[in-house]
Image (cartoon, rainbow, N blue to C red):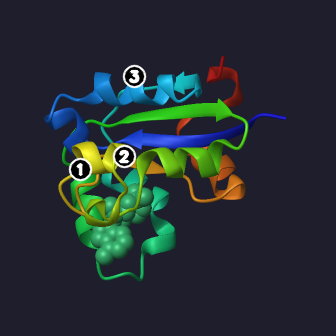
Amino acid sequence: MKERTLAILKPDCLEKRVQGKVIQHIIDAGFGIKGMRLLSLSEDSAKKFYAVHKERPFYVELVAYMTSGPVIPLCLEKDNAVADFRKLIGATNPANAEEGTIRKMYADSIERNIVHGSDSPENAKNEISHFFKDSDLV
Ligand code: CMP
């Protein structure tokens, strides 16, 4: 049974104009794209999306950054999608990311780390529903 995960290409990805390259890496790694949007997150929506981090010291900056420019949320599907996508993107801090991972190739810092990936199948379901209705998915 295929699994789904949520990716978000973050504002730095679009600022650097590498969203096409990153999407190609995702396709080449065997993920099917079930949904894709281009949007600007409102402060309210970003706060809700990252509510699990609201007590963390980086929360305010994270919300400010995620609302600083357009983002591209993607609903991706593949066997073992959650774990395989996190492997493809590499460690949250690009300084610790393995060679060949998306963050190693394109990200500057833990704050500006190019891409988000869900960290569990359960969170993936909630995160996908933040951006997509079932009827939006192909
Ligand atoms: P993401 O996978 O989108 O989930 C939470 C985000 O918080 C994370 O990527 C980082 O970009 C961001 N962040 C900023 N500072 C930190 C930090 N010190 N530790 C973990 N995540 C951080």
Residues at marks 3 and 1 touching, judged by CB atoms closer than 8 Å: no
In this rendering, is residue 82 above or below 93? Answer: above
Q: Can residue 69 be seen in this view?
A: yes
* Quarter of the figure that contains the C terminus: top right
**Who is closer to the viewer here, 103 or 136?**
103
- Amino acid at the residue labelled 2: Val
Residue visible at 62% across and 52% down? 83
- Amino acid at the residue labelled 1: Ala
Residue visible at 38% across and 62% down? 92
Q: Mark 3 points at which residue?
A: 24
In this rendering, is residue 123 above or below 42? Answer: below
Q: Residue 51 carries which label?
A: none
As measured in the structure, the alpha-carbon distance from the residue carrying label 2 to the one carrying label 3 is 14 Å
Q: Which of marks 2 and 3 is nearer the N terminus?
A: 3
Q: Position of residue 124 (x, y in %)?
A: 63, 50
As measured in the structure, the alpha-carbon distance from the residue carrying label 3 to the one carrying label 1 is 16 Å
Residues at marks 1 and 2 touching, judged by CB atoms closer than 8 Å: yes
Q: Name the residue under label 1.
A: 107
- Observer-side mark, 1 or 2, equals 1
- Amino acid at the residue labelled 3: Gln
Quarter holding residue 106: top left
Q: Residues within 10 Å of mark 1 (few under 14, many from 20)?
A: many
Q: Mark 2 points at which residue?
A: 115
Is the residue at mark 2 in contact range of ligand 1, meaning its CB lies under 8 Å from it?
yes
